[in-house]
């Protein structure tokens, strides 16, 4: 019986090593394919087909924005789970992570600095999300669902309008930032 256990452990270890080797080989292969001329041509073709407005971002900004989008989805998931059990406090806490704030405003302005209309669209999304917390305070399930629906419509509207375009620093700096009005002028 002991030999059988050792053979099983060896087989598991060998399977794991093979799987990890395949995964590494697959990652290396994916990296090399992504840098081929054919892949570059495919990326250009996608760029031409996708008619959404480009949102130019430096690589770090694009990664940060994608992380925020994942956090937004997690907040929506937490809201729906809380609403399902009548936990309006949980709904409000999750909704607050989507809501507007000075920090969120600064981030949206920074991300949208090279794409006219993005900042305003993003800020409307966050302001719409504020209404979820208001409805949760009233413990009004239907109002929470209505506010969440409007928030998700703002979210999908933004995704339907804008697409990330990762650029290098020279391109980012060469793009003109839209003029900002000062004191209402």
Image (cartoon, grey):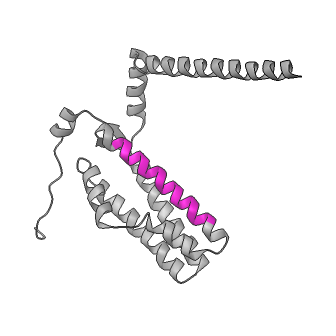
Q: Main secondary structure of the magenta part?
A: helix
The residue positioned 54% from the left and 66% from the top of the image is 149
Q: Is residue 52 visible?
A: no
The residue positioned 23% from the left and 50% from the top of the image is 113
Work out whether 12 lies above or below 113.
above
Work out whether 14 lies above or below 129.
above
Examine the structure image and report whether residue 104 is included in the region drawn in magenta. no
Task: Name the image quarter holding the C terminus.
Answer: bottom left
Q: Is residue 15 left or right of residue 49?
A: right
Q: Residue 126: x and y, percent?
A: 39, 64
Of residues 23 and 145, the one drawn nearer to the viewer in this rendering = 23
Q: Residue 68: x and y, percent?
A: 42, 52
Residue extending furthest toward the front: 2
Of residues 45 and 7, the one drawn nearer to the viewer in this rendering = 7
Q: Is residue 45 left or right of residue 57?
A: right
Of residues 22 and 66, the one drawn nearer to the viewer in this rendering = 22
Q: Is residue 28 visible?
A: yes
**Quadrant in the rendering for residue 1:** top right
Residue extending furthest toward the right: 1
Examine the structure image and report whether residue 63 is included in the region drawn in magenta. yes
Q: How many marks?
A: 0
**Quadrant in the rendering for residue 4:** top right
The residue positioned 41% from the left and 16% from the top of the image is 36
Q: Is residue 137 left or right of residue 162?
A: right
Q: Residue 143: x and y, percent?
A: 55, 77
The residue positioned 26% from the left and 59% from the top of the image is 106
State which region is magenta.
62-81
């Amino acid at each position: 019986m002991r030999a059988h256990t050792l053979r099983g452990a060896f087989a598991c270890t060998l399977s794991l090593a093979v799987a990890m080797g395949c995964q590494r080989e697959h990652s290396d292969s994916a990296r090399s394919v992504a840098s081929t001329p054919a892949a570059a041509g495919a990326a250009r073709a996608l760029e031409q087909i996708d008619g959404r407005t480009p949102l130019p971002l430096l690589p770090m900004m694009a990664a940060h924005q994608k992380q925020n989008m994942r956090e937004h989805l997690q907040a929506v998931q937490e809201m729906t789970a809380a609403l399902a059990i009548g936990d309006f406090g949980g709904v409000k806490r999750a909704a607050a992570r989507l809501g507007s704030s000075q920090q969120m405003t600064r981030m949206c302005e920074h991300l949208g600095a090279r794409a006219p209309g993005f900042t305003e669209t993003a800020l409307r999304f966050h302001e719409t999300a504020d209404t979820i917390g208001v409805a949760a305070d009233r413990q009004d399930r239907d109002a929470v669902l209505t506010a969440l629906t409007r928030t998700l419509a703002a979210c999908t509207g933004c995704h339907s309008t804008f697409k990330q375009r990762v650029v290098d620093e020279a391109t980012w700096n060469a793009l003109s930032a839209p003029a900002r009005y000062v004191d209402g002028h």
